[in-house]
Image (spheres, rainbow, N blue to C red):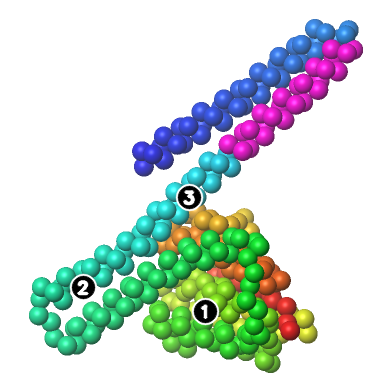
Amino acid sequence: MRVRARRRKSVVFFITLSVSLVVLAIALNVGWIVLNWGEIALLIFGIIFFVVLIFGLVLNTTFLIREIRRNEQHDAFINAVTHELKTPIASIRLYLETLKTRDVDDAQRHEFYNIMLADSDRLLLTVEQVLRAGRTGHRQRRIANSVIDVDEMVRECLERTRVRYGLNEAHIVYTDGANGAKVSGDPDELRAAFSNLLDNAVKYSDDEVRVSVSVSADDEKRVVVRVADKGIGIPSAQLKRIFKRFYRVPGRFMARVKGTGLGLFIVQSVVRKHGGRVYAESPGLGQGSTFTIQLPRV
């Protein structure tokens, strides 16, 4: 908290300084132009110098604000990743110490094993997210093309999500209208994109999970995958920002869900590399959201 307070003070100081310099530059240049109104050459030189100076100050201020926001996002990412790594490790250690120091019956032992396996999966998922975000950030990285049945892959991702969160068919409803449509792409990357959308739909749902997933072929050129939830929704001003690396929507509703801010960045990066597009829709907070992926058919 103290670090954030100092950073905010620094932000206020540098922004105030930049604004003051802009005002001072305007005053000095306007005064200089008025005093040298009769000198045409000096007047032209002063106007050019004035424009360059103001442009430089505005550019410097813009760059400063962007760097501050980027640093804040990096800090939030480090904190989120630290939490996502520390929590399952602490849980696994606790159960291992319990098994080592106490006599437990077979039923409880198997329960402990299942919990530790789930924590291990959570730990592995976090590590894979970070590594995948680094790989997808390289635009020149080639993808391993294979012909993929979208319906089959989405069903696979959906079943994994149900198992991971202990859900049934009533919680996640699936509709297939793709008629066996296929796309060309990297199976691992597309699987990660679909899984991220499903995970988000579950995590950002309210107390009762109600998610609908559909695969359809709108025309002969595109396959569309939609994931809709009845969760906490997204403010309209944030619908485009949520796909940025490390970005998380501010607010107490969003803060309830832990995450690294990489999931949707990975989704967008993967979809773009496969020649498609992804976008989000939401009526507003508390009214759910819908994510749509469009991919070219083969």
Q: Quadrant of the N terminus?
A: top left
Amino acid carrying mark 1 in the image = Val
State whether residue 224 appears in this view: no
55 drawn magenta: yes
The spot of residue 169 in percent (x, y) is 47, 88
Q: Nearer the viewer, mark 3 or mark 1?
A: 3
For label 1, the residue is: 211
Q: Image height check: is 247 above or below 183?
A: above
Residue 26, quarter of picture: top right
Q: Which residues are magenta?
A: 40-64
What label sits on residue 95 in the rendered view? 2
Q: Residue sitting at 63 percent across and 33 percent down?
A: 60
Q: Nearer the viewer, mark 2 or mark 1?
A: 2
Mark 2 vs 3, N-terminal side: 3
Question: CA gap, disc 3 to disc 1?
Answer: 31 Å
Mark 3 vs 1, N-terminal side: 3
Mark 1 Cα-neighbour bin, 10 Å: few <14, some 14–19, many ≥20? many
Evaluate if marks 3 and 1 touch, with contact meaning CB atoms under 8 Å apart: no
The spot of residue 290 in percent (x, y) is 60, 72
For label 3, the residue is: 74
Mark 2 vs 1, N-terminal side: 2
The spot of residue 5 in percent (x, y) is 41, 37
